[in-house]
Amino acid sequence: MVGNRLGETASRAERYGPLTEPRWVRWLLTAAALGFLGLFLFVPLVLVFVKAFEGGWDAYLAALRDPIALAAVRLTLLVAALTVPVNLVFGLAAAWAIAKFSFRGKNLLVTLIDLPFSVSPVVAGMIFVLLFGAQGWLGPWLSEHDVKVIFAVPGIVLATMFVTAPLVARELIPLLQSQGDDEEEAALTLGASGWQTFFRVSLPKVRWGLLYGVVLCNARAMGEFGAVSVVSGHIRGLTNTLPLHVEILYNEYQFAASFAVASLLTLLALVTLALKSLIEWKTSR
Amino acid sequence: MEEPVKERRAGGRRLPGGSVLPGFGLSLGIALLYLGLIILIPLSTLFLKTFTLTWSGFLEKVSTPRALAAFELSFTAAFVGASINAVFGLIVAWVLERYRFPGRRLVDAMVDLPFALPTAVAGIALASVYAGNGWIGRWLEPLGVKVAYTPLGIMVALTFIGIPFVVRTVQPVLRDIDPEVEEAAASLGAGRWTTFFRVLLPELLPAVATGFVLAFARALGEYGSVIFIAGNLPMKSEIVPLLIMIQLEQYDYAGATAIALVFLIASFALLFLINFLSWRRHRGSMREEVAP
């Protein structure tokens, strides 16, 4: 498809002179676009990997094998393993309610789901400190019962859930809406139960969008920095996630180690983007 | 705003949610429960906490010279970042949709990188690239341009973070423009520039505006990618989220709450504006499909 379009544009330029720009304008605009993306996107991206391997392969592996780094990896995996399934259930439920039914206050619900996107990550972390912190509303009760939320793992999970809550729902709502209800209604008429209809008719239709929502939610859960930074307390080996570990190493001038850990998170982002392209390609066929 | 409820009846009984499909109560229940527990109750603590301040105490906290400088810097830098993205985002969207060049699909996919890349990684990478001895910084320094550890660095980070928004709002609009519109303009004697500025640009501007506001809202609250490149000097290069963070670390919860509330209200106003812009573009249909 891409190959065809290449030839098509060239011939289009010759045949419909007035419908495309002169060659020099096309060159100039392409150069401007690529130059802009190069300065702000590609150069920083390449730099992460160059700096990560500056000290050689051994130093790279040593930075990742460091016990504190491994503890950060484990915590990050744990946070994602708790956050993603919960957000998946929420996303499915919210998208089903919004896409398939009409009710009062639906637009308000859609807006509320998007709310975390417009809240600064620092504020997102802060509200959990106000709720569960030592001086917070539930602080005295929590300390009486010896439950630690802030500067501990539960706070990190809650803040991550807040920040990533909209992602799955956001992917699914437009997809479920555009599919229509005919097949579901047919399944129900033929005697399928509600759950059967949901799992065997509705879900398969939106499986690629669902997969991307989950993958993006996972990437954001593993990479969340601002909100987690507020609630974590930065206790090495205990409440440091990978992004916080990157920050600590960088601030200690251990640049190579910092970029080595950062390269892991960058790979995760690149895999996420690759999967998105693959899914778009699969669904457009 | 409200959609008319479809009055579908089965055996004289109005169906919940106006559809024969099952699971209305369950799915709405789960959604509202989670929304309440994870988003609404925690957010409401911010408002409740503000009520413990007196009005004059609130004003005092948000109008210290340091807070005012931070507000000014955050809004200015977010505005500059979003403006750069409005111009270059339009160019990138145009080039990706209209021209064919090797690696186009790769470039198209990479536009989403700021969504997927952890902000701390973006922060340390940008700081290293634009530092005085960095790959790009070393070419700018002899020209007298210092980027890293100045307000200019903040603008660079906020530009990075906003890249996907304008591109992804403009692309679908550009794809949907009927070629006949341009053909008509050309056949009526309009040159390419006239066609672009009089025919195409008016179609694209609402999308650019939506993308601009989305990028601005995202940039306003951004923390991770900024703090490494900013320098973080009070009154000079300290953004509002960092000021909130510092006050929290000093247990000045009243100050942090007051500033966060002002910030949150600004964000809500932007969210309202985004919804209004996309409502105008779609004439009442559902929200924009731009996942930040």
Image (cartoon, rainbow, N blue to C red):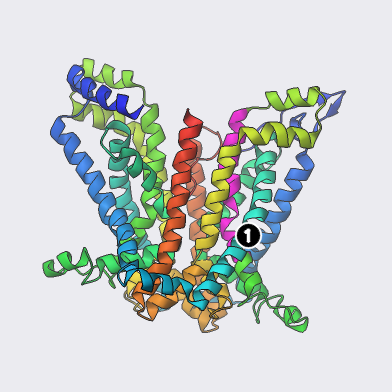
At x 74% / y 82%, what residue is drawn? A146
Q: Is residue B177 left or right of residue B139?
A: right
> Is B253 above or below relative to A32?
below
Give the percent coordinates (x, y) of residue B175.
38, 29
Give the percent coordinates (x, y) of residue B39.
64, 59
Looking at the picture, tell me which residue is in the foreground, A75 or A202. Answer: A75
Q: Is residue B246 magenta?
A: no
At x 17% / y 24%, what residue is drawn? B191
> Is A175 above or below relative to A217?
above
Q: Which residues are magenta?
A: A158-179
Looking at the picture, tell me which residue is in the foreground, B31 or A105. Answer: B31
Residue that mark 1 sits on? A81
Determine whether the residue tagged by mark 1 lies in a helix, strand or loop: helix
Looking at the picture, tell me which residue is in the foreground, B117 or B46. Answer: B117
Give the percent coordinates (x, y) of residue A17.
18, 21
Q: Is residue A167 magenta?
A: yes
- Mark 1 crowd level (few <14, some 14–19, many ≥20, 10 Å Cα): some
Q: Is residue A78 left or right of residue A2?
A: right
Amino acid at dot 1: Ala
Give the percent coordinates (x, y) of residue B211.
40, 45
Looking at the picture, tell me which residue is in the foreground, A277 or B116. Answer: A277
Q: Quadrant of the N terminus of chain B?
A: top right
